[in-house]
Structure formats: C-alpha cells, structure tokens
Amino acid sequence: MIKTVKIEGMSCQHCVKRIDKALNALKGVQATVSLENKSAELNLKKEIDEKLIRSAIEDLGYKVLEIK
C-alpha cells in the first residue's frame, strides 16, 4: 500500500532528513521524502493509523496538508 503525504514547511535538505528519519522509524513504514514535491511517499507493509503519520511529522514542526 502506498500513501502520499503533502507537507508544508520544508525548506532544505535538513528538513527532508528529519522527516525521513521520523517516518522510517514508524513500524512497517518505508518513506521517501521529496523537497521538490513537498511530499513524502510511504510504502506501508500494513495499514497504519494516519494519526501516527501526522504526529511524526507535525511533532517536528511541519504541517501535514493531506494524506492520500
């Protein structure tokens, strides 16, 4: 299962690395974060609560615009 997360507030590669680390720390998630697209693509091994995804990003100070 693949989900795309639109993220507001990323401005540099440091931001990308922080979000990448936080998302990949979630169990069953393999994430690729793109500064250019202002998004993260998540390859999920199993269904995961979107609240966990949102919290992992927003706890770092970024804003999740949508998850689809």
Image (spheres, rainbow, N blue to C red):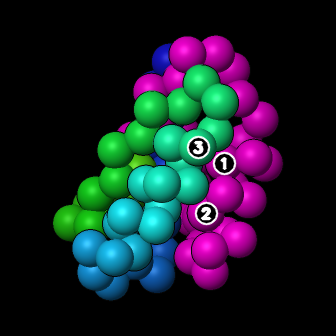
Residue 53: image location, x then y, percent:
66, 48
**Which residue lies under the disc numbered 3?**
25
Give above or below for 62 relative to 57: below
Query: Which of the labelled discs sits on residue 57, or is there none?
Result: 2
Residue 43: image location, x then y, percent:
45, 27
Res 36 quadrant in image: bottom left
Q: Which residues are magenta?
A: 41-68
- Report whether 42 appears left or right of 64: left
**Which residue lies under the disc numbered 1?**
53
Name the N-terminal-most of marks 3 and 2.
3
Residue at the spot x=37%, y=64% of the render?
17
Q: Nearer the viewer, residue 26 or 55?
A: 26
Task: Give the CA distance from mark 1 to mark 3.
Answer: 11 Å
- Report whether 58 appears left or right of 22: right
Query: Which of the labelled discs sits on residue 15, or is there none?
Result: none
* 3 or 2: mark nearer the eye: 3
Q: Residues within 10 Å of mark 2 (few under 14, many from 20)?
A: many
Residue 19: image location, x then y, percent:
48, 62
Give above or below for 52 relative to 3: below
Task: Give the CA distance from mark 3 to mark 2.
Answer: 12 Å
Query: Which amino acid type is marked by label 2?
Result: Ile
Q: Secondary structure at mark 2?
A: helix
